[in-house]
Image (tube, grey):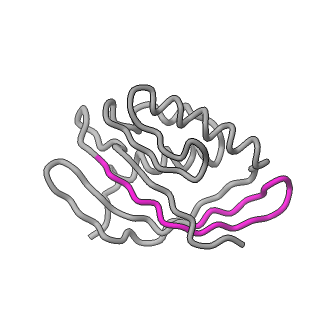
Amino acid sequence: MQPTGEMMTPVLALARFMATGDDGGLAGAFASEGMVVVENFAPFLFDGPGAFDRWRRGFGRHAEAGGLSELRWRFGPAQDFALEDGGAYFVLPTTWTGKTHGRAFSEEGGWAFVLAQDGGRWRIRGYAWAVTSKG
């Protein structure tokens, strides 16, 4: 089984933000409470009150320091999909390509998502990113 289009809506909003830096599409993508994010930039764990704002600012600093540009993503088929009690879990094999300080790069990893029904929509309750290879 694969995530529905409605489940992918907040995930795609997140990927677009990371690729473009435009946070206009993030409104409503994350759960209103209880958000937890594990990332590969400091402070690595974003949780508790204000987590969303700390994560958004942190990603901006990460992108700027890394000189990230021309970012593109590609998802593979979802792995380990589970749907229960108004929540969903799945892992997306993900490839990011782009430039860091003008040099081409490729990064592969697993993006594990926990979604929750919140206000009648699927929203990201948490995610964790793990790099599995860089090129």
Let me know if residue 106 is in the magenta part: yes
Q: Quadrant of residue 81?
A: bottom left
- Residue 105: image location, x then y, percent: 75, 65
Residue at horizontal 55 percent and vertical 31 percent from the top:
24
Residue at horizontal 60 percent and vertical 32 percent from the top:
57
What is the span of residues highlighted in magenta in the rendered image?
95-115
Let me know if residue 77 is in the magenta part: no
Magenta stretch: dominant SS? strand
- Residue 23: image location, x then y, percent: 57, 34
Name of the residue lying farthest toward the right = 102
Most foreground residue, 64 or 24: 64
Most foreground residue, 84 or 131: 131
**Quadrant location of the N terminus?**
bottom left
Most foreground residue, 61 or 15: 61
Residue at horizontal 80 percent and vertical 64 percent from the top:
104
Task: Examine the rendered structure and indicate whether residue 89 appears above or below residue 17.
Answer: below
Q: How many marks?
A: 0
Task: Examine the rendered structure and indicate whether residue 13 appears above or below residue 78.
Answer: above
**Quadrant location of the C terminus?**
bottom right
